[in-house]
Amino acid sequence: MTSLPHADGVDPETPLSVLSRFAITTLAQDMTDFTVVAQMPIGGMRNPFTGLPTVAGLAILVDDVAGRVNYYRRGRGVWTVSSELTVEMSPGAVEHLLDAPDEPVIAHARPLGPAGATLLSICTLTHGGTVIGGGTVRTMPLAGGPDGPLDRGADSVVRTPQTTLAELMSVEPLPVRDGVHRLRQHPDPMINNLIGIVHGGVSSAGLELAAAAAFNHEQAVPFRTASIRINFLRPFVAGAQSVYEATALRIGRTSAIADAAAIGDDGKTAVLARVTGYR
């Protein structure tokens, strides 16, 4: 398979700057069956709060491939905006990733059901030939759309094997207060979509990082994220006050749940998440 550019225009939700920043490579796409296959390196990604291995980056890959499937099914003169995203991890997925960190994760995305008031797609995540999870993206078609790519300039991040996920996402953990884990989202044009707001996969990853930190706080044996459920409420604009906030709802012996919110520079909640972990 060879790397392919976007076809039939550029998906306004996943611009080329995001694909480049996170090293997402398109392996194949079929404009008849509306399928997309892409890969992304995940090995070495860590939660900036805990230092534990994280699957947060997979939300970016799911948002790209499943979002593109929905975008390619739109009608003429229509663009798309995501309303929901999910990521589900198989038991032992993190351990499988740790066993072969140099192997990228491959996502195979396809439509789920017919197009209607919304578009729904599903993808399967594999690593080294083993299924480790999957995800879905629900998208709403809208009339109009951005006129073209934004002028972003050169990428300030030079990616090396030592570049952290926090650096790729332009996020910074803040001190924990009253049990709330906060992750600052710094402005960065490279992680924005074509209308100048934070890419949905990036904001989903930020919510997972904060939520996983919340339910793993002071835990001797960590919980592994198994389920990420995202609702996009309004545009998430990064600025001086933009932040992800998460609080643990329940921490049990074998499972834990946390809720998280992305709060934009205007002080409004833009994205919500519920994250579940198991051990």
Image (tube, grey):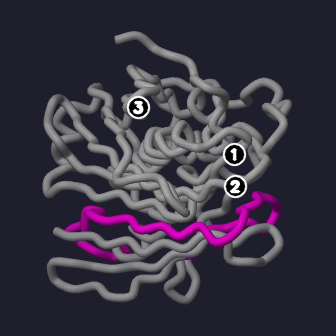
Q: Is residue 95 above or below residue 223?
A: above
Picture disc at residue 78:
1
Q: Is residue 242 above or below residue 115?
A: below
Question: For mark 2, what is the residue?
Answer: 142
Specify whether 279 is left or right of 195.
left
User: Helix, strand or loop at disc 1?
Assistant: strand
Looking at the rendered structure, the kind of residue marked 2 is Leu
CA gap between label 1 and label 3 equals 20 Å
Horizontal and vertical percent position of residue 22: 53, 33
Q: Quadrant of the C terminus?
A: bottom left
Give the total number of marks visible in the rendering.
Answer: 3
Picture disc at residue 36:
3
Q: Is residue 193 above or below residue 269?
A: above
User: Helix, strand or loop at disc 3?
Assistant: strand
Choose top left, top right, bottom left or bottom right for residue 251: bottom left
Looking at the rendered structure, the kind of residue marked 3 is Val
CA gap between label 1 and label 2 equals 5 Å
Is there CB contact under 8 Å for labels 1 and 2?
yes
Horizontal and vertical percent position of residue 211: 44, 71
Front residue of 199/75: it is 75
Q: Examine the rendering and report whether any part of residue 47 can be seen.
A: no
Write down the region rendered in magenta: 216-245
Residue at 55% in and 48% down: 166
